[in-house]
Image (tube, grey):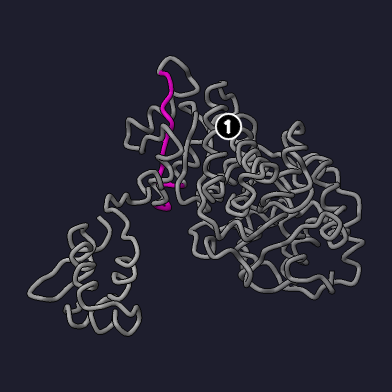
Amino acid sequence: MPNDSPKEVATRLALLPWMTPKRIRTLLSLGEPCVVTAILREWSTDRYARLVDIPLVDIPLVDIPANIHALLTTRCSKTVARTLGDVWCEAIRDSVELAESLSTMDLHIIGRGDYPDILNDDQNAPPLLYSRGDLDLLNRRRVGIVGTRNATEHGRTMAYKFGKVLSQNGVAVVSGLARGIDAAAHRGVLAAMSNSRTSESTMSDSTNNAGPIAVVATGLDVVYPREHHGLWKEVGEQGLLLSENPPGTGPLPYRFPLRNRIIAALSEVLLVVESRLDGGSLITVREALDRGVTVMAVPGATSTKAAQGTNMLIRDGALVAIEPDDVLIALGLDTRRQVPSFDSRQPPLWPDSEVLNLITSDPLTLNDFARLANEKLAMSFGDVAVSLGRLEAHGWLMCTAGWFERIGAR
């Protein structure tokens, strides 16, 4: 413990029960590792339960005891064990191997000083952020895709489609790796990346594809739900996994609504594909609206409960997203109308093309053309005059008061 880095000290603190993000931020703001030690020592007794009622500023600052590891590995008292459960007690005891476990799991702890810029000024930023994967994805354009776990086949298909097309357009998709809409969106992103690697015709554009960003509610070493083990691994390898919870944190119900604020904070646009009237996605919507994030929703059939929440959002003013292009428009990335301009003019042939190249930005007189053409092209005055006449007739030049100007593409 005395040799722990500040990040490891903060992680040990986060491993303690009843440590909400707000409480962790308050303790870390004191800047004294011995505060953590005091809490750990108090936790090792039955008195820890009373700490929740003690103002944080009144916690005594004590010297770090030499036997801190012994305190951490002692058996939980019966009172604490009954209150917290054996799983929590085991998590605290296992925290003595924290430094080793962090290195073996290839995790990165983002703390003060190297925090993502997009979260630095957030009103409720996580005090710690654990990551696995490509942090550069946070510098990409980002769209959050959320929805119900009990999604319909239509909802999963739409989430997959939006995720795939957004990735192909360089937009990173942020979601929660939950069942239903989240998983479908992530799989769409991974499909886009896989297609880019295997298709020779798109190999040159594969670097434009953006990987998935998953914000999970457990520790990064605790896969939830278990059937997403393969998906979890792919996202960590090809995208980015993020969590504010330290290693070993299980799928506690209250942590899922908490993580939704991070999804909202990372999103430039939040897209809701399917949501029930009481769905957790609406929590993410509220967090997004509090941050001024644009909310979009995919309309669904009025007869299905899975779409009642999204239809309500549209009724209340959310933007409608029928196709991925609608989201690209909201991001200012729509390219449907960016087609090459068509020039109906007949391309000038030699020597007209060479004469046309003699003029740049400034207008020229006939004498100017004749002099330049004689020097560079060895053309006579008469040939230059004829060439200028053809260029003017075909719309490449215009003559105003004896001065010739080049005309841009029509």
Indicate yes or no whether the magenta region holds residue 289.
Answer: yes
The spot of residue 105 in percent (x, y) is 82, 54
Quadrant position of the N terminus in the picture: bottom right
- Of the pair 182 and 285, the residue shown nearer to us: 182
Look at the image and give the residue range highlighted in magenta: 288-301
Q: Is residue 2 magenta?
A: no
Q: Quadrant of residue 388?
A: bottom left
Task: Specify the farthest residue to the top.
Answer: 303
Task: Decide which of 5, 243 is in the foreground and name it.
Answer: 243
Which is nearer the eye, 383 or 250?
A: 383
Question: Which residue position is annotated with label 1?
Answer: 181
Q: Position of residue 266 (x, y in %)?
A: 53, 53
- Other-residue count near label 1 (Cα within 10 Å), few / some / many at <14 / 14–19 / ≥20: many
SS for callout 1: helix
Q: Specify the quadrant that holds the C terminus.
A: bottom left
Q: Say which residue appears at 53% left-offset and 26% top-offset.
A: 155
- In front of the other: 169 or 98: 169
User: Is 8 displayed left or right of 326 in the figure?
Assistant: right
Q: Position of residue 257 (x, y in %)?
A: 57, 41
**125 on left or right of 12:** left
Question: Is residue 349 visible in this depiction of the protein?
Answer: yes
Q: Does residue 122 lie above or below 328 as drawn?
A: below
Above or below 279: residue 363: below
Which residue: 69% across, 46% down? 197
- Tell me where residue 365 appears, x and y as whole percent: 16, 79
Q: Amino acid at mark 1?
A: Ile
